[in-house]
Amino acid sequence: MGKNKLAKFAKNKTFSHVLQPSNEAVLNGDFHLKGKWSEEFGNNNPIVLELACGKGEYSVGMAEIYPDKNFIGIDIKGARIFSGAKEVEDKGLKNVRFLRTKIDFINSFFAENEISEIWILFADPQLVKPRKRLTSQLFLNRYIKLLKPSGLLNLKSDSDELYAFTKNESVPAFNVENKKLQFEKLDDTNELYEKGIKSFDETMQAVLNIRTFYEQMWLEQGKKIKFLSYRLQAR
């Protein structure tokens, strides 16, 4: 392991806004902030997750645009999280946290109805193992348990496969505690920057224009960016 990466790991430990629980701690019980994230932020503002956040560009960017919301970027790669964590420190942002863990454990970290919105940005399309896609039935079931009623799920991707797969996976209704819940599609485009989302206001357009490291790379290769947005509703 390179010295630069080790230095980033060491620095992450000094950031109060970077939380790094051990896998063993989560496997043996729920994380101590489950159901208490509002206390962690010191307010009752809506909580938004960025899954597989990488360098945390969206968590940081949205935190600047929406100071009245709280953002949590989740990723297992500590060296990537460092970039966003350092930017949060430099800008003095108080409404961002980074959580270093596997997304498989997400229900050990967040309580029922604790999350208002989820963003999935340029996630691995998992061409060999579709079940591991972050929009598979396996993961959608997990999100439903933590999203508030009418909570939002957003996908931004360069992958034709993940885009088409997500539209198919989001159709079924899920039975949760004798209730049938379903993701209602709000927006759908396979050419985000060419077609845009006409229903979005200027603020939301600014959110969509945040560019992650990977998005910029795909755009330079001439790839089209896809966007899907859903609202959780009872049937």
Image (cartoon, rainbow, N blue to C red):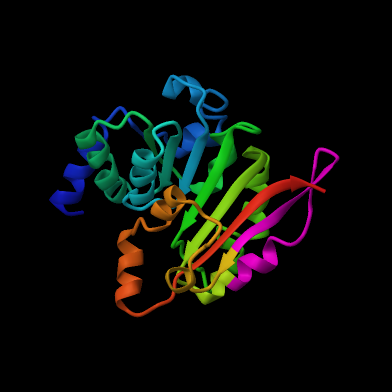
Q: Residue at x 47, y 21 (%)?
A: 43
In the rendered view, does 186 fall on the left or right side of 58?
Answer: right
Is 180 a magenta residue?
A: yes
Horizontal side, residue 96 vs residue 183: left or right: left
The magenta span reads 164-187
Q: What percent of the width, then of the height, locates residue 59? A: 38, 44
Observer-nearest of 138 and 67:
67
Residue 168 part of the magenta-drawn span: yes
Residue 129: tell me if it is visible.
no
Quadrant for the N terminus in the image:
bottom left
Residue sticking out furthest to the bottom: 222
Q: Is residue 186 above or below residue 166?
A: above
Instruction: Where is residue 14? Give x, y as percent.
Output: 23, 30
The percent coordinates of residue 78 (x first, y second) are 31, 46
Judge by depth and name the residue closer to the eye, 7 or 97: 97
Q: Residue at x 42, y 24 (%)?
A: 41
Q: Is residue 39 above or below residue 131?
A: above
Q: How many marks?
A: 0
Query: In the image, what residue occupies the spot 43% across and 44% down?
Result: 74
Q: Quadrant of residue 193?
A: bottom left
Q: Residue furthest left?
A: 3
Q: Is residue 37 left or right of residue 170?
A: left
* Residue at the image position 59 percent from the left and 68 percent from the top: 130
Residue 221: x, y in percent? 32, 79
> From what the image shows, is residue 114 above or below residue 160?
above
Residue at the far right in the pictured view: 178
- Image height check: is 172 above or below 25? below
Question: Is residue 181 visible to the viewer in this orientation of the structure?
Answer: yes
